[in-house]
Amino acid sequence: MAKGTAAVILVILIIGAVSGYFFYTRYVQGTVVLSITDPPQVQPANGQQYDPSILHIYLTFATMEIHQGGYGNSSTSGWYAIVGSQKTVDMISILTTTKTLGSARLSTGTYDQLRFPVSAAVVTFSNLGNVTYSIPSDSLKVSITGGGFQSSPGTTVNLRLTLSFNSNEILAMNGHLTPHATAQIVP
């Protein structure tokens, strides 16, 4: 009789441990904090990142999402919102600093890409006013360096999106901007 009771207790403990593990890894979440910067890259002609006639570069993001690796097709599924509402950023204002865009709680797992539809790209020139540009495919998808990061319960990961443009492409005023983007974990 003692062996039967011990076996029942052992089964209950195993079920409890497995249930606790699944609860902990699925429902106790980590956090990701997303920030953006436009790194200063001095242009040889004038010693500045952008031509002095460029006063503002406004980008409006419809949303910003992160992809959980191993979940579905990276084009259609496994995406979770970090910034769920529209945000406009003046890239000139973040040349020497970063701006926090938002944060989200993430289930345990590996996250490997960012995706953000760009609903508007407007450059303000000192001599022309506002000029509207388009971004290829109206959306950007950026792989996170190093294969991404692991989210685990109770941890916070700081993810920095670095986004910049070529001053000559802006000045060409061909209506298109091709961003140079990276995403990486920062301390």
Image (spheres, rainbow, N blue to C red):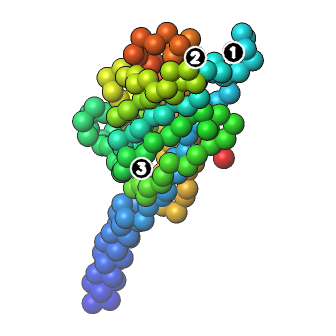
Q: Give the SS element for disc 1.
A: loop
**Residue 1, picture quadrant:** bottom left
- Reading the image, the residue beneath label 3 is 82
Of 46 and 24, the residue lying toward us = 46
Residue type highlighted by circle 2: Ser
- Residue under label 2, please give it: 167
Q: Residues within 10 Å of mark 1 (few under 14, many from 20)?
A: some
Residue 177: name its quadrant.
top left
Which residue is rendered at x = 50% and y = 21% of the image? Answer: 128
Q: Residue drawn 30% across and 43% down?
A: 78
Position of 50 with respect to 89 (left or right) is right
The Cα–Cα distance between marks 3 and 1, rounded to whole angstroms, is 33 Å
Q: Kindly report the distance in space between the C-alpha atoms of the residues bearing marks 1 and 2.
A: 8 Å
Marks 2 and 1: in contact by CB < 8 Å? yes
How many numbered discs?
Answer: 3
What residue appears at the point 50 percent right and 48 percent down from the top-left corner?
101
Q: Earlier in the sequence, mark 1 or mark 2?
A: 1
Location of residue 30 with respect to 75 vertically, above or below: below
